[in-house]
């Protein structure tokens, strides 16, 4: 009974993206973590027409063996409000043994915009993405708060925009997850202050290995992991030793592992000199290798 109770507790926390402290007898690596893929990895193929948005999940499963799918809003081409179109994605994923994780949303208007009219527009624009994510069965949408400016005023504006979006997300199972992506959001201290000011179960963070600007990426990920719904393992290129050249994956994934986080670690490959499938494959394999070293 003890093992089953631990399993249920850990499984529930994993589905919510909640960090869990593990005992020695709980969850081997391949159960504790799931490898995901972010659609932005294939942005050039999507823009050129080499890859169709509806075919992206099948590519991830067939070419990479990855069944945890993250989307990018741009390839929807405005069809995210089309229930039949989104329903087709549902059929091509959940019916094929895949799990839809989140949607990366890059909207023109910012949720922390200085101008209230811009914030209002941003909230309305993002509401449709919450609804789309809910239909897909995603656990989150990944949003930007990069207006910058005075830190305290920026926090107030963020709390207004994200707070209203969190209200819309209540009961949907979809969290609103801030990505470190410009402005004050690259500062882990600001992100933690944002979580404290929001103080809502629908809000979370998306630690990204490479998005913290001039701040120490390892310390930033460590600080933000307690609020992580997913983790973004961004990669660009690999050295002769197989490690990523911008981020020491062995050091970073040791931090992730020791934090007790359980859930999705997402491949986001942005290199230009390697085929995105091959780059994703190398990133995926490096993640597992680094996690195995962290556990050793």
Image: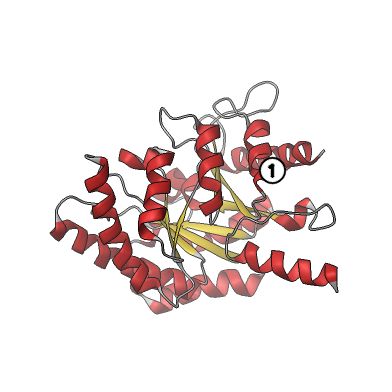
Q: Residue at position x 55%, y 54% from top? A: 230
Report the side of 34 relative to 142 (left or right). right
Element on which disc 1 rests: helix
Left or right: 67 as drawn, with respect to 28: left
Quarter placement of the N terminus: bottom right
168 or 227, which is in the foreground? Answer: 227
Residue 118's x, y, as percent?
17, 57
Please say if 276 is above or below 90: above
Residue at x-position 39% and y-position 58%: 73
Please give the name of the residue rendered at 45% of the width and 68% of the height, measured from the top-left corner: 133
Q: Which residue is mark 1?
A: 258
* Residue 79 visible: no
Placement of 50 over or under 123, stated as above or below: above
Pick whichever, 277 or 11, lies toward us.
11
Q: Quadrant of the C terminus?
A: top right
| Foreground residue among 201 and 274 | 201
Q: Is residue 61 above or below residue 2?
A: above
Can residue 184 be spotted in the picture? yes
Q: Is residue 156 left or right of residue 100?
A: left
Colour setup of the view: secondary structure
Quarter of the figure with residue 2? bottom right
User: Measured from the top left, where is residue 214 in percent x and y?
Assistant: 41, 27
Residue at 19% of width from left, 63% of height from top?
120
């Amino acid at each position: 009974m003890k093992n089953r109770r631990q399993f249920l507790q850990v499984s529930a926390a994993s589905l919510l993206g909640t960090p869990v402290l593990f005992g020695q007898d709980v969850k081997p690596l391949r159960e504790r973590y799931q490898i995901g893929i972010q659609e932005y990895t294939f942005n050039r193929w999507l823009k050129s027409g080499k890859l169709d948005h509806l075919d992206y999940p099948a590519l991830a499963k067939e070419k990479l063996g990855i069944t945890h799918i993250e989307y990018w809003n741009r390839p929807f081409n405005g069809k995210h409000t089309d229930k039949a179109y989104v329903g087709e994605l549902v059929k091509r994923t959940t019916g094929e043994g895949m799990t839809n994780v989140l949607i990366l949303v890059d909207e023109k208007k910012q949720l922390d915009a200085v101008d209230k009219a811009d914030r209002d527009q941003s909230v309305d624009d993002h509401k449709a993405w919450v609804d789309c994510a809910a239909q897909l069965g995603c656990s989150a949408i990944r949003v930007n708060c990069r207006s910058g400016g005075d830190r305290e005023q920026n926090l107030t504006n963020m709390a207004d925009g994200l707070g209203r979006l969190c209200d819309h997300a209540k009961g949907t199972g979809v969290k609103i997850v801030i990505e470190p992506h410009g402005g004050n959001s690259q500062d882990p201290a600001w992100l933690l202050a944002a979580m404290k000011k929001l103080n809502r179960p629908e809000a979370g963070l998306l630690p990204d290995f490479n998005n913290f600007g001039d701040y120490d990426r390892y310390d930033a990920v460590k600080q933000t992991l307690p609020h992580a719904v997913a983790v973004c393992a961004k990669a660009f290129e690999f050295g002769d030793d197989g490690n990523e050249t911008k981020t020491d994956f062995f050091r970073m994934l040791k931090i992730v592992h020791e934090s007790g986080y359980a859930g999705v670690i997402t491949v986001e490959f942005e290199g230009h000199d390697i085929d995105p499938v091959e780059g994703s494959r190398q990133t995926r394999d490096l993640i597992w290798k680094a996690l195995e070293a962290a556990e050793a």
